[in-house]
Image (spheres, rainbow, N blue to C red):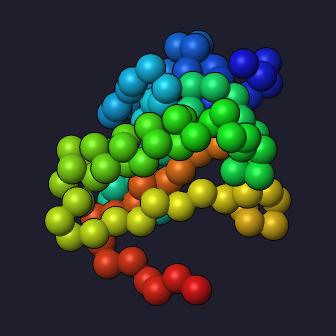
């Protein structure tokens, strides 16, 4: 746990969050500034600063992240209509919290990306 990391504090139960999924490796909760009707963050319990900091030992965590994203999409009612799973790495990509997190976004027509 990084002492100054808000997401580590959420994982530890020190900061409240509207949880929608938890397992041994990840937690998922509603984003406090949603960009769409459904906007859930899926984060590893282990502190990893960004996708750039992943190691081969983190492959199980990545699998859990995507399994959790699928679960969230089904539970939030966006699996059939479609959703986006995205992560940002670093300042220029828009990463604000330096704890790896994936946004599960849906519930409306999303614009084309790229």
Please determine whether, in this image, residue 90 is positioned above or below residue 9: below
Residue 66 visible in the picture? yes
In the picture, measured across the screen, residue 61 lies left or right of residue 2, that is left
Residue 63: image location, x then y, percent? 46, 42
Residue 21: image location, x then y, percent? 34, 31
In the picture, measured across the screen, residue 51 lies left or right of residue 3, that is left
Residue 61: image location, x then y, percent? 54, 35
Question: Depth check: 9 or 32 in front?
Answer: 9
Give residue 111's quadrant in the image: bottom left
Residue 38: image location, x then y, percent? 34, 55
Q: Quadrant of the C terminus?
A: bottom right
Question: Depth check: 79 or 76 in front?
Answer: 79
Residue 96 visible in the picture? no
Give residue 24's quadrant in the image: top left
Please determine whether, in this image, residue 90 is positioned above or below residue 58: below
Considering every residue shown, the one lying at the far front of the view is 56
Give residue 75's quadrant in the image: top left
Kindly identify the residue that appears in the image at 36 percent across and 43 percent down. Answer: 67
Kindly identify the residue that appears in the image at 46 percent across and 60 percent down. Answer: 85
Q: Quadrant of the N terminus?
A: top right
Q: How many marks?
A: 0
Kindly identify the residue that appears in the image at 41 percent across and 65 percent down. Answer: 84
Please determine whether, in this image, residue 41 is positioned above or below residue 25: below
Please determine whether, in this image, residue 92 is positioned above or below residue 68: below
In the picture, measured across the screen, residue 109 lies left or right of residue 79, that is right
Question: Depth check: 110 or 51 in front?
Answer: 51
């Amino acid at each position: 746990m990084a002492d100054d990391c808000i997401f580590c504090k959420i994982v530890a139960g020190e900061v409240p969050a509207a949880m929608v999924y938890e397992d041994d490796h990840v937690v998922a909760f509603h984003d406090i500034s949603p960009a769409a009707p459904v906007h859930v963050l899926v984060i590893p319990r282990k502190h990893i600063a960004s996708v750039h900091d992943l190691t081969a030992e983190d492959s199980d965590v990545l699998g859990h992240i995507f399994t959790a994203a699928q679960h969230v999409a089904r539970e939030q009612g966006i699996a059939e209509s479609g959703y986006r799973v995205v992560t940002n790495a670093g300042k220029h990509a828009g990463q604000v919290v330096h704890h790896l997190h994936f946004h599960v976004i849906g519930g409306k027509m999303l614009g084309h990306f790229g």
